[in-house]
Amino acid sequence: MQLISIGKAHEAFIKPGVEDFTKRISNYFPAEWVIMPTPRNAGVLSEKELKKKEGEQILQLIKKEDWLVALDEKGKQWSSEGLAQFIQTRANESTKTLIFLIGGAFGLDEKVLERCNHKWSLSNLTFPHQLVRLILAEQLYRACSILRNEKYHHQ
C-alpha cells in the first residue's frame, strides 16, 4: 500500500500520529508514504498550470498495474466497513500496489482523475491536507482491524 501526498513534509503536530498509524497498517500490509514536493515556482503558476505540473509528477510514479484511489471531493464516500471490504477485494484480486493519493491545494488534474480506478471522498467537509494524511492513515488502520475482527473499531 502506498500513500502519496503533494505538499510539505508531515507537520510536527501530525507526524507522530501518521507514523503510528502507518506502522500499525504495516502489521497487515506493507505501507509507505511518498511526499511529493509542490512544483517549483508554484506561486507564479495559475491553478490549472499547477494542477497540470503536479499531475505530470504523479503520473510518472504510477505504474499501469497499480490500483489508484484518488481522494477527491466529488468521489464516493465509504463507511469504515465499506473501506475494509474494498481493501479485502483488492487483496483477493491480488492487486500488486494499492495507492491512495492526496492531491495538492487545488485538487487533482483531470488526467490523474481519468487514470484513477476509484475516487473517494472522505467527507463533505474541507480538511487541511496535513489532517487528511492523519485521517487517511487512521481509517486505513481501522479498515485493517475490521478485516481481522479486532476490537479497535468498537473501542
Image (tube, rainbow, N blue to C red):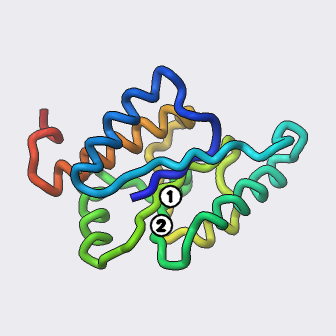
Who's the residue at 47% across and 47% down the image? Answer: 33
Tell me the kind of residue under disc 2. His
Mark 2 or mark 1: whose residue is earlier in sequence = 1
Q: Name the residue under label 2.
A: 118
Who's the residue at 37% across and 52% down the image? Answer: 31
Secondary structure state at the residue bearing disc 2: strand
Where's residue 51, x and y in %?
Answer: 75, 53
Q: Distance between the residues labelled 2 and 1?
A: 8 Å
Residue 150 falls left or right of residue 18: left
Q: Which mark is residue 75?
A: 1
Who's the residue at 86% across and 41% down the image? Answer: 41
The image quarter containing residue 58 is bottom right
Where's residue 126, x and y in %?
Answer: 55, 36
Task: For the residues labelled 2 and 1, say whether their Cβ atoms are less than 8 Å apart.
Answer: yes
Residue 107 falls left or right of residue 73: right
The image quarter containing residue 28 is bottom left
In the picture, the quarter occupied by the N terminus is bottom left
The image quarter containing residue 147 is bottom left
Other residues around mark 1 within 10 Å, as few (<14) / some (14–19) / many (≥20):
some
Q: Residue 129 carries which label?
A: none
Where's residue 12, x and y in %?
Answer: 50, 22
Who's the residue at 22% across and 49% down the image? Answer: 27
Secondary structure state at the residue bearing disc 1: strand
